Amino acid sequence: MSKIVLVAASAVLVGASVSGCAGTHHSPSEPAPAPTAAPTPPSVSGQWALVWADEFDAPGNPDPARWTHDIGYVANQEAQYYTSRSENVRVEDGLLVIEARKEPWMGYAYTSARLKTQGLAQFLYGRVEFRARLPTGRGTWPALWMLGSNIGQVGWPTCGEIDIMENVGFDPLKIHGTVHTDAYNHTLGNHRSGTVEASPPPWEDFHVYSMEWTPDRIDIFLDGERYFTFENEGTGTAAWPFDQPHFIIVNLAIGGSWGGQRGIDDSLFPHRMFVDYVRVYERKQSP
Ligand SMILES: [Ca+2]
């Protein structure tokens, strides 16, 4: 089955217990995230076993045992240059902070960051959960998502893509969950997706963005409410490449083919996305 990286459960649970009060300890130089409406929710019910997590409890650089960085220009006509500098990505106050800045860098006008577990942890089936607060403003395009680990061999979209959360700043209340495959993808105009509005607005408070994945279906949730399902048609890899491990990506894009459709408001920088945790669960075997 999947090549799962096991994390000491005790460390993860300690992190879970202290990570809820995101608004309590902030360095003077950074604006405090909005107080959370509720403590970090407890782990999902007993049918799930935690197999991987980052609670972002250690200040400084993201844990190199869990995360690697994409550097430079990556895709989608995006306007930013991704870096691994602390200006663009850091852990503080129990949160992963990805900060998009308007600054000239390597020929680009903006910088930001894109973290991934590629080569470090990959997952096949289970439940993937993020608790995050999004930035907002015309031109932002934050995403919490997964790509097939075989992308280097088979390319996109054959590898499969699962977008657990996407949001674009020009339509800021809407949260999108999407899958891309060879048979269904945005270049064909037939990608499969669902949309829901977040309340309170996703930049005002944290929400839980999650996905449950079995051999038969992918369900995507906002705060535990399912708003999108993609079923395995049983017609093979073109429609269902989701029988292969995928890795996790967290990024904040600026501009690009979707986020930039109505331009970029340069008056709003810097933009910050805050991620309280990323947790991956496997379904427990029936007794
Ligand atoms: Ca945390």
Image (tube, grey):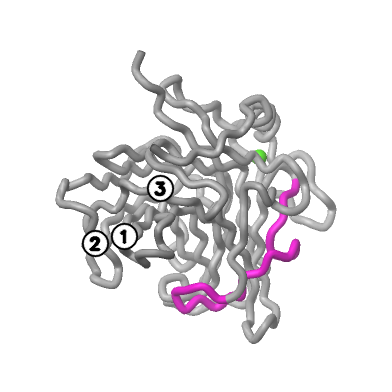
> Which three-letter amino acid code belongs to the residue tagged 1?
His
Q: Does the magenta run of residues contain 77?
A: yes
Residue 180 visible at all: yes
Query: Where in the figure is residue 280, as x and y percent of width and height?
Result: 50, 37
Q: Earlier in the sequence, mark 3 or mark 1?
A: 1
> Dot 3 surroundings within 10 Å: few (below 14), some, or many (20 or more)?
many
Which segment did they paint magenta?
Answer: 73-92
Say the numbered circle drawn on residue 184: 2
Residue 222 visible at all: no
Q: Which residue is mark 3?
A: 245
Query: Where in the figure is residue 64, as x and y percent of width and height?
Result: 68, 51
Q: Which residue is mark 1?
A: 180
Q: Given the current orientation, which residue lies at the most extreme bottom position?
A: 107
Secondary structure of the residue carrying numbered label 3: loop
Within the image, what quadrant is residue 287 found in?
top left
Q: Earlier in the sequence, mark 2 or mark 3?
A: 2
The quadrant of the picture showing ligand 1 is: top right
Query: Where in the figure is residue 203, as x and y percent of width and height?
Result: 56, 53
